[in-house]
Image: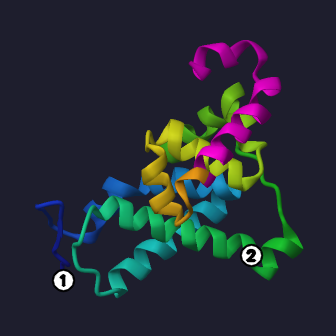
Amino acid sequence: MSLVIVVEGVFILNVSEMIDKYSEHLLRIAYYYTKNLHAAEDIVQDVFIKYTQSNYEEQGQLRAYLTKMTINRTKDYLKSWSYRRIQLREHLPTIPFFQKERIIHRELQSTIGEAVLSLPIKYREVIIFYYYEELNTAEIASLLQLPESTIRTRLRRAREKLRPLLSDEWEEYYE
């Protein structure tokens, strides 16, 4: 049996096509929060399971809805007892086998990616949404349910924290 979903006016024949379309984006977001590939994969899987079990009615973009679900699920994970108790730090393999692992592996190897991942989560998330997802401050404020002035302050503070870490590269990306 195939579940038919309508996304942004386009029929998606089944859930697997929707997963193919959005999983890379959601995986990247979850990974930037958790810094753990396996936890990020579990979170994205949970998001898709909850989505298929929900009675979601199209009110906006599905991508934004799934992104918000991923952020909330990731924050729940970071607050969980098991995360705080165990905090396993896994390293990516030297030779990645899957495309999604290659994407994250490339991000980790870049100086900018490492610097962004070293930021505290409240600064990391605004940098990710502003520079990687290319959202404006109003969209980020709506997504995180924070005042826009808070987003601008966090963005400014995040840039200040990144400046010493990226000395040479900073001039290219700051402008």
* Residue identifier under label 1: 1
Q: Is residue 78 shown left or right of residue 65?
A: right
* Residue 137, horizontal then vertical, whole percent: 49, 46
Name the quadrant containing residue 5: bottom left
Closer to us: 119 or 93: 119
Q: Residue at x 44, y 43 (%)?
A: 136
Q: Is residue 26 shown left or right of residue 88?
A: left
Closer to us: 62 or 107: 62
Q: From the image, state whether disc 2 or disc 1 is nearer to you.
A: 2
At label 1, counting other C-alpha atoms closer than 10 Å, the crowd grade (few under 14, some 14-19, many 20 or more) is few
Label 2–label 1 contact, CB within 8 A: no
| Earlier residue among tags 2 and 1 | 1
Q: Is residue 153 shown left or right of residue 25?
A: right
- Under circle 1, the secondary element is loop
* Residue identifier under label 2: 79
- Under circle 2, the secondary element is helix
Q: Which residues are magenta?
A: 150-175
Is residue 137 located in the magenta-colored stretch of the structure?
no
Quadrant the C terminus occupies: top right
Q: Type of residue at label 1?
A: Met
Q: Residue at x 73, y 40 (%)?
A: 157
* Residue 53, horizontal then vertical, whole percent: 36, 87
Q: Is residue 94 visible?
A: no
* Residue 144, horizontal then vertical, whole percent: 53, 62
The type of colouring in the image is rainbow
Q: Type of residue at label 2?
A: Lys
